[in-house]
């Protein structure tokens, strides 16, 4: 009775939700001590406490022993919580393993268009995740884990349901095109560059001939500098602007009164 799906649960992809996990792994989960002791009578609310205690993701490890992560995933498939509750699991940014658990459940149960809409924003989450597998522990990241959910056929040792390609969903169901973070960053950088060029253009530019062109107004004003001679002050010499007189020669000054020579007495 403890291993049966909750009464009134709807079928997923035409089958019992628990059957989305392979029979071998499912039977190993039913026999595990963690399932019998910790997962008994869990609800959508009390399951949060167990998910917060997780320290890794994964399917099976060692001698085909199921991880706690996989046991809680089967419990979610068994109790089949409402869609709003799963979305709340996904939006909790503080507990990354709870988010990873909700992401895998959404990938298994939800429609393809909803999967893309809910999981693609998680590609901006770059936190580290520990993965427990047959060879021990490994390291991955949340964005890589979500990318595997969207592209790969097998994640955490279970086969994922087939999903319609995104291009088809955009044409048939009107799914919004995916917004690339790289394109947004490149667009913002180009906008900043074009804004800087516009400011420099309004301030004016000097061409090779020495002309100064003001480009910010409707008409361009050009001031020629070729025909303008530099003043002495500009050339580095100081010259007084008052009229100057050259030094007079000895014979230049002559007396206006008649001269009185000694011979004319």
Image (cartoon, helix red, strand yellow):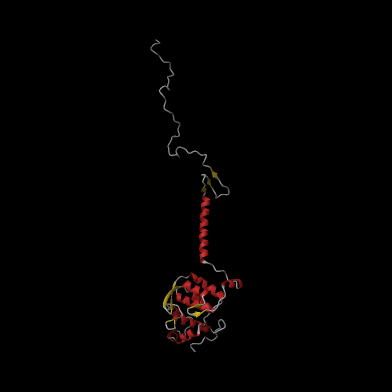
Point out the residue furthest to the left here: 262
The number of numbered badges drawn on the structure is 0
Residue sitting at 50 percent across and 60 percent down?
A: 189
Point out the residue furthest to the bottom here: 1
Say if residue 121 shows up in the picture: yes
Point out the residue furthest to the top here: 265
Residue 61 x %, y %: 43, 81
Image height of 76 relative to 265, above or below: below
Corner quadrant of residue 33: bottom left
Of the pair 233 and 148, the residue shown nearer to us: 148
Residue 135 x %, y %: 42, 78
Q: Quadrant of the C terminus?
A: top left
Residue 249 x %, y %: 41, 24
Point out the residue furthest to the right here: 172
Say if residue 85 shows up in the picture: no
Residue sitting at 41 percent across and 77 percent down?
A: 137
Image height of 246 relative to 147, above or below: above
Residue 260 x %, y %: 40, 14
């Amino acid at each position: 009775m403890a291993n049966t799906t909750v009464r009134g649960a709807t079928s997923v992809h035409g089958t019992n939700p628990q059957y989305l996990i392979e029979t071998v792994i499912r039977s190993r989960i039913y026999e595990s001590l963690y399932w019998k002791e910790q997962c008994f009578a869990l609800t959508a609310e009390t399951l949060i406490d167990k998910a917060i205690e997780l320290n890794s993701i994964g399917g099976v490890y060692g001698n085909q022993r199921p991880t706690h992560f996989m046991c809680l995933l089967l419990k979610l498939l068994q109790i089949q919580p409402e869609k709003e509750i799963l979305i709340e699991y996904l939006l909790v940014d503080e507990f990354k393993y709870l988010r990873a658990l909700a992401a895998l459940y959404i990938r298994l149960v939800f429609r393809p268009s909803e999967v893309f809409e809910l999981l693609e924003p998680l590609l901006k989450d770059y936190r580290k995740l520990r993965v427990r597998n047959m060879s021990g522990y490994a390291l991955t990241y949340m964005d890589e884990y979500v990318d595997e959910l969207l592209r790969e056929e097998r994640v955490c040792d279970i086969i994922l349901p087939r999903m319609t390609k995104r291009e088809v969903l955009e044409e048939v169901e009107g799914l919004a095109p995916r917004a690339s973070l790289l394109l947004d960053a490149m667009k913002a950088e180009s906008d900043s560059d074009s804004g800087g060029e516009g400011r420099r253009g309004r301030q004016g530019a000097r061409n090779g001939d020495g002309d100064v062109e003001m480009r910010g107004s409707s008409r361009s004003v050009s001031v020629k500098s070729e025909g303008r001679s530099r003043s002495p002050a500009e050339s580095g010499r100081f010259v007084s602007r008052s009229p100057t007189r050259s030094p007079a020669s000895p014979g230049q000054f002559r007396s206006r009164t008649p001269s009185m020579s000694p011979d004319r007495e």
